[in-house]
Structures are given as structure tokens and as C-alpha cells.
């Protein structure tokens, strides 16, 4: 089993790369997606969050009011730690289940936005960084995502720098071109991953 850490700055196109790797047969473990799943209605995770933060963090339909919870935890480190103490173990458990269910010869790609920031490179056999110039990130965030330039710059500044990400990369995908160019780059990466996986 080859464990690959996939990361990239906001707007770099990490999700596009992740989707293309999944289409080629990779087992994708998306930490953000799992973090949402473990607090869906009816889960022990959501019950624990409500027990900790109260009914005020629920929407009328019984699902989690992420915005309300976010405003509580981002303003208070202790409350954030309380939330993480509930969610992180559940995410870890779910990730382990997914890895155990994967075939022994699988290429397992961990989609981890804050891999660089949290010093997680050592957990993987290989780290792949999806890279674009900062100007491209800004253009995508203000264009496709409709953010103000100020918001976009703040989001980019809150993450690791491009240089910090590139320093931990074993493999870099340049995603500043067309989708056709991205397909070709992912094909080349997949060939490399299969070769490494076969080499064991």
C-alpha cells in the first residue's frame, strides 16, 4: 500500500487532481469530507457536539449549523480544542476503516489541505503538491469563487507559503494551465505512483 499525501494552497486545484486520481483507481481519503460525515444527523459525533455546545448549534432541520459553530470556536481557542477533541478521533477512526478496507496494493491518497502547516509530511510515503502562482490563486478565488480580493489574500496568507509547500514536495503538479494539461500531468503522476506501488 502506497500512502500519498496530497496538498496545495486554496484555489490551486487540489480537488481537481484528487478527482482525477480517484478516476484512475486511487483510494481517496478526504479529511474535510470525513469531518463533515462524522457530524451528520443521527451520528454519535453530532450528539457529542450538541452535548458540548448546546442546541443552538443545530439548524431547524436537525443538521449542524456550521456557521454558528464556526463563529463560536474561531473566537475561542478552548472551545475550538473542545470541538477538535470530539471530531478528530472520529475522523481518525473513519480514516483507519477506509484504509483497512482498501486492497493491499492500493494507492491511498490522503487529501489534506493543511499538510504543510501541521508538519504531516512524515506520515506519507510520498507528498504531492498541487502548485500554481499566487496570482493564479487570486484570479480563481475572486473569479470562480466570487471572493473579494481582500478575502482571497487573507485566506492565502493564512496558509503555508508556496515556498514552504514546495520544500516538502516529493512531486509537484503545475496546475496553472488548461484542464487538458492537468490531465496529462495527472497521467504522469499516476504512472509514477503505480511504479512506486509495484516496487513496494
Image (cartoon, rainbow, N blue to C red):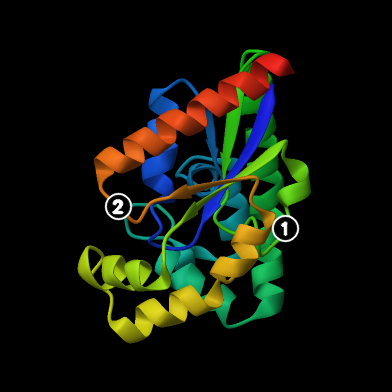
The disc placed on residue 85 is: 1
User: Label 1, label 2: how many angstroms apart (C-alpha)?
Assistant: 40 Å
Residue at screen point 71% across, 76% down:
78
Q: Is residue 77 left or right of residue 23?
A: right
**Residue to which mark 2 is pinned:** 177
> Which image quarter: residue 100?
top right
Note whether residue 170 is visible.
yes
Residue 79 image position (x, y, % from top left)? 66, 73
Q: Quadrant of residue 133?
A: bottom left
First-in-chain label (1 vs 2): 1
Residue 19 seen in the figure:
no
Residue closest to the eye, 111 or 65: 111
Where's the N terminus, which quadrant?
top right
Query: Of helix, strand and loop, which one carries label 2?
Result: loop
Q: Is residue 28 left or right of residue 135?
A: right
Q: Does residue 42 appear to the left or right of 63 in the view shown?
A: right
Residue 29 vs residue 62: left or right? right
Rendering coords of residue 7 (x, y %): 55, 51
Mark 2 residue crowding within 10 angstroms, few (<14) / some (14–19) / many (20+): few
**Number of other residues with Cα within 10 Å of mark 1, as a class: few under 14, some 14 to 19, many 20 or more:** few
Where, by quadrant of the figure, is residue 12 drawn? bottom left
- Which element carries disc 1, helix, strand or loop? helix
Amino acid at each position: 500500500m502506497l500512502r500519498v499525501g496530497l496538498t496545495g494552497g486554496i484555489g490551486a486545484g487540489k480537488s481537481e487532481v484528487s478527482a482525477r486520481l480517484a478516476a484512475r483507481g486511487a483510494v481517496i481519503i478526504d479529511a474535510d469530507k470525513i469531518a463533515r460525515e462524522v457530524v451528520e444527523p443521527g451520528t454519535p459525533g453530532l450528539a457529542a457536539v450538541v452535548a458540548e455546545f448546546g442546541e443552538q448549534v443545530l439548524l431547524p432541520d436537525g443538521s449542524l449549523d456550521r456557521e454558528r459553530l464556526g463563529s463560536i470556536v474561531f473566537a475561542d481557542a478552548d472551545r475550538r480544542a473542545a470541538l477538535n477533541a470530539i471530531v478528530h478521533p472520529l475522523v481518525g477512526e473513519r480514516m483507519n476503516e477506509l484504509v483497512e478496507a482498501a486492497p493491499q496494493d492500493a494507492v491511498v491518497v490522503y487529501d489534506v489541505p493543511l499538510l504543510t502547516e501541521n508538519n504531516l509530511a512524515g506520515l506519507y510515503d510520498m507528498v504531492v503538491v498541487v502548485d500554481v502562482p499566487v496570482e493564479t490563486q487570486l484570479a480563481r478565488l475572486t473569479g470562480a469563487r466570487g471572493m473579494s480580493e481582500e478575502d482571497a489574500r487573507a485566506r492565502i496568507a493564512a496558509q503555508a507559503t508556496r515556498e514552504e509547500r514546495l520544500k516538502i514536495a516529493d512531486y509537484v503538479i503545475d496546475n496553472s494551465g488548461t484542464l487538458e494539461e492537468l490531465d496529462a500531468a495527472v497521467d504522469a503522476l499516476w504512472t509514477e505512483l503505480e511504479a512506486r506501488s509495484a516496487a513496494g
